[in-house]
Amino acid sequence: MREKQLIIVGAGLAGSLLATLLCRRGWQVTVYERRGDPRIKGYESGRSINLALAERGRHALRRAGVEDAVMAQAVMMRGRMVHVPGEEPLLQRYGRDDSESIWSVHRADLNLTLLELAEQAGAQVHFYRRLHTVDFGAGYARFIDDRDDQPYDIHFDVPLIGADGAGSALRAAMNRWSPLGERVEFLDHSYKELEIPPTAAGGFAIEPNALHIWPRGHYMCIALPNHVKTFTVTLFLPNEGEPSFASVHSGADAQALFEREFPDALPLIPKLREDWENHPPGLLGTLYLDRWRLGGRALLLGDAAHAMVPFHGQGMNCAFEDCVALADLLEANDDVNAAFAAFENARKPNALAIQKMALENYVEMRDRVDDPDFLLQRELERQLQHRHPGRFVPHYTMVTFMRIPYAVALRRSEVQRGILVEATRGHATLDDIDWNAVDAQVRARLEPLQDTA
Ligand code: FAD
Ligand code: 8RB
């Protein structure tokens, strides 16, 4: 093996950030990306797709020195704005104040920023190079230029990092060489993206500083603001049943669904029929692997290793956290094999934890956010946060505004949920809560929390 050289497959969010972090530490990094250079051809598919950036992601951007540049274009989302038919939309704050907010960022802009940073840091990025196959025996990799189907073969004797997303070609190649124990669990729900344009006056059509949710029990719509004053709307719907992607086919069916179930959102989405008919529903699922690596020769991270359902808005945040962890471990270990092993050991339990929490948050978003029992538990959660600072920390705060391991957040959340459910059972308000008993539970069952600031 050559010293301090490696190849990254995929110049998406994780690949380009990782390239930057490693180049800064003296690694020679070559990146192969399936798509073209976004600075040359129009990157925009026409629609704005946005992502929620939270503390874990921001921390990684901070480490790369681009946090301020990214935040300059981000739209603050201070809470969920819940839309229930016949009621005024209600804001449920994510944190104690605006400092605890999530941020809507534009994917294409973010990717471009990170890519430029990687090149500035010295990474060699090759575009139109889609990894096709790898011969780990001979040390050959084949890439295809999708413009003309031309193959390009390289000989490699340095480690390969798979940052090539949920459909990872490197994962497939590794799995063929030595099975990774791959299992994909598709959700029986899919999604469709729609858009809310700016008003005629050029402003945001609805409250900009929130993540909007239209909860409807078994399904829901959400909307995230873009800095160009549009909103990207995502409808999540079951694949079967009523209503579902099986029963809502045409643009007209979709229109009827919105008239019935989302009457306040419908007038905001003028191209509902068009968007519906032009974009197929997207699949959702969780990817589980027993192994993320082939010794010190190849390693997967981000979606390639642990794709998850979107409902905690943590896929990118987790992928960025992976990048920082790997860069630190490659720095701390002389040997790549040891660094890869330490990475896999450290990150796998955390990936599993956020995958689980992401699945759970779907039920919360679509069914619980307008439920009186849930709102009472939330209120108690706030009170206990105040009564037990550093000990009772709300679930959402641990995942979104802290950098404690996801596995720790999951474990503590389960204990806390037990306390909240138990203490509010049979109560309609907090007026007659037995505070002594609840406080005792908190002290007995939750150790003070240390943040890894
Ligand atoms: P990607 O960003 O997918 O990058 C993979 C890269 O590899 C791409 O550039 C691709 O072109 C390239 N590539 C693929 N195959 C090959 C190949 N064979 N050879 C070479 N290159 C290849 N996460 C959040 O944290 N918050 C959110 O709000 C959020 N919203 C989302 C909204 C949508 C619509 C979607 C689809 C995802 C969202 N996510 C969100 C998840 C987030 O996008 C992913 O978790 C994140 O992009 C993972 O980063 P990655 O680098 O692993 O993969
Ligand atoms: N992938 C998000 C949250 C949590 C919000 C809350 C949820 C769309 C695809 Cl569904 C979703 C969240 O608990 O109040 N934070 O950020 C982002 C989400 O969906 C994104 C936009 C998304 N991801 C395929 C579609």
Image (cartoon, grey):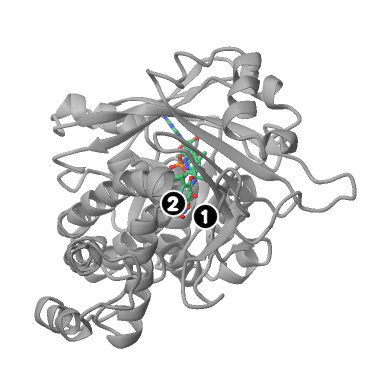
Q: What element carries label 2?
A: loop
- Quarter holding residue 141: top left
Answer whether labels 1 and 2 touch (C-beta < 8 Å): yes
- Quarter holding residue 309: top left
Q: How crowded is mark 1: few (under 14 residues within 10 Å), some or many (20 or more)?
A: many
Give the vertical position of 388 relative to 208 (above or below): below
Q: Residue 40: x, y in percent?
A: 71, 38
Q: Residue 188: x, y in percent?
A: 33, 26
Q: Residue 313 carries which label?
A: 2
Q: Is mark 1 on a helix, strand or loop?
A: strand
Q: Residue 52 carries which label?
A: 1
Give the vertical position of 314 relative to 175 (above or below): below
Sequence-wise first label, 1 or 2: 1
Closer to the camera in the image, 286 or 1: 286
Amino acid carrying mark 2 in the image: Gly
User: Which residue is at a point 21% across and 68% down the rendered structure image?
Assistant: 416
Q: Residue 31: x, y in percent?
A: 46, 44
Q: Is residue 43 visible?
A: no
